[in-house]
């Protein structure tokens, strides 16, 4: 069996290399022979001695408070994060997620003890229509759509719970309804979805899971960073010299998202960094601290490039990602590492890691089905290569968001 697995992995990585996905191929070659448990141990062995910025600590604290963690819990979480700076950054926010995201959480947390925390930073900068189904309860027998059709193109970030969602939940089977947190019209959808996802997955994960909104933390951080004109974030947005350098290297990258009203419906737009402003198809936002602060307090949502600059490169979190992130994060890192004003951050040392795959015995295993009683007996000594080959078609044919990894 090992010989056959080796042959299939070799064929897979050969195709990936030809397609220019060298980082993904390299990670697979280096790790496919490890057991799931040993691969998880290697992911969780990362520690960082560089201090975490105080403003990031405050940004995280604000998000944990939004999610109703107690003061004692927040203190424990932040203390742990200072030493164990590893984040799962694959996920989009969802109340009951797709099978691959659940597998990734299981794999990542597998080697943790009861004293350890497991962190999942969930991305909300997508519309409800995104293929990861951020507005649905995902099950093998079919998804339950909580969001009305009129909201499908709306931005998930800072969205509110609609009346239709309450009605849908009321009509769910009792045993499913019991798994969900209480939902109230007009309250934060993302806070509810994060709580739901954690509640459903918790008993199948090791360690103490902490799920939170990636974009909320970055927005909190930006509001603090732009108060200091010497901070690199302020230089990128407000100093012509550093801004031009950033535009030259990242001119095709999305820096922010925001909603726009189109007739009766809301849609989301992408904003790019320009000389003196952020620009979307229909709007220009002048770049000065007052205007940017006002927009961030609304629904201007930070994008990946901004988030990873802060978490991975300025604060040296190991941001664990899937097959696309393992390609674009090193590209971002290598570009930012050349910026003279970022030299002291030693960006070249920033660590990345691959977390992807599926359960070899059932690639379509949903966390929600497990919470409803489906049997769960994963083999922690199965090889990581088996998990990778279970999603071989995805690795070979999935759209890798080339706008993120274009050189």
Image: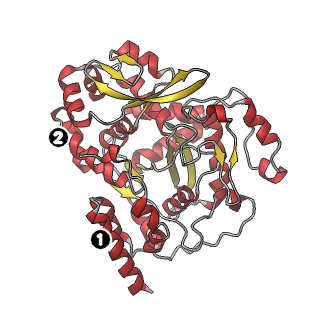
- In percent of width and height, residue 256 lies at 40, 30
Name the N-terminal-most of marks 1 and 2: 1
How far across and down, in percent of the image, does residue 125 sit?
49, 36
Mark 1 vs mark 2, CA separation in Å: 31 Å
Task: Give the number of the disc on residue 180.
Answer: none
Question: What residue is drawn where x is 54% and y is 61%?
Answer: 103
Please tell me whether mark 1 sits on a helix, a strand or a loop. Answer: helix
Q: Which residue is mark 1?
A: 14
Q: Residues within 10 Å of mark 2 (few under 14, many from 20)?
A: few
Q: Nearer the viewer, mark 1 or mark 2?
A: 1
Q: Residue at x 57, y 67 (%)?
A: 363
Indicate the position of residue 25 as horizontal and vertical percent values: 31, 65
Q: Quadrant of residue 227?
A: top left
Q: In the rendered image, which residue does mark 2 sit on?
A: 338
| Number of other residues with Cα within 10 Å of mark 1, as a class: few under 14, some 14 to 19, many 20 or more | some
Residues at discs 1 and 2 in contact (Cβ within 8 Å): no
């Amino acid at each position: 069996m090992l010989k056959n697995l080796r042959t299939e992995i070799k064929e897979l990585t050969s195709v990936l290399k030809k397609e220019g996905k060298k980082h993904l191929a390299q990670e697979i070659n280096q790790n496919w022979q490890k057991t799931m448990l040993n691969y998880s141990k290697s992911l969780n062995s990362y520690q960082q001695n560089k201090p975490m910025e105080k403003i990031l600590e405050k940004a995280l604290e604000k998000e944990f408070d939004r999610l109703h963690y107690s003061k004692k819990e927040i203190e424990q979480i932040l203390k742990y994060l200072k030493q164990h700076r590893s984040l799962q950054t694959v996920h989009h926010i969802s109340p009951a997620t797709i099978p691959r995201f659940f597998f990734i959480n299981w794999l990542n947390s597998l080697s943790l003890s009861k004293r350890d925390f497991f962190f999942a930073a969930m991305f909300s900068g997508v519309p409800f229509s995104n293929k990861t189904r951020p507005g649905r309860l995902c099950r093998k027998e079919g998804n339950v759509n909580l969001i009305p059709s009129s909201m499908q193109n709306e931005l998930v970030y800072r969205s509110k719970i609609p009346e239709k969602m309450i009605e849908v939940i009321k009509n769910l089977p009792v045993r499913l309804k019991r798994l969900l947190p209480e939902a109230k019209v007009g309250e934060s959808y993302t806070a509810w979805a994060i709580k739901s996802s954690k509640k459903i997955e918790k008993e199948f994960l090791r360690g103490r899971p902490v799920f939170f909104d990636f974009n909320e933390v970055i927005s909190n951080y930006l509001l603090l960073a732009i108060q200091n004109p010497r901070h690199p974030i302020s230089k990128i947005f407000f100093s012509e010299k550093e801004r031009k350098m950033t535009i030259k290297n990242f001119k095709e990258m999305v820096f922010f998202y925001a909603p726009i009203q189109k007739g009766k419906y809301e849609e989301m737009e992408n904003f790019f960094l320009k000389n003196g402003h952020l620009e979307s198809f229909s709007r220009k936002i002048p770049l000065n601290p007052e205007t940017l602060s006002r927009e961030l307090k609304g629904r201007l949502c930070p994008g990946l490039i901004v988030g990873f600059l802060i978490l991975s490169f300025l604060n040296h979190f190991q941001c664990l990602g899937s097959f696309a992130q393992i390609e674009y994060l090193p590209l971002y890192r290598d570009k930012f590492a050349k910026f003279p004003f970022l030299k002291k951050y030693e960006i070249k040392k920033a660590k990345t890691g691959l977390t992807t795959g599926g359960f070899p015995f059932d690639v379509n295993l949903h966390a929600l089905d497990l919470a409803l009683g489906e049997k769960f007996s994963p083999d922690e000594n199965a090889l990581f290569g088996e998990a990778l080959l279970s999603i071989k078609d995805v690795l070979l044919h999935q759209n890798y968001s080339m706008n993120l990894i274009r050189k």
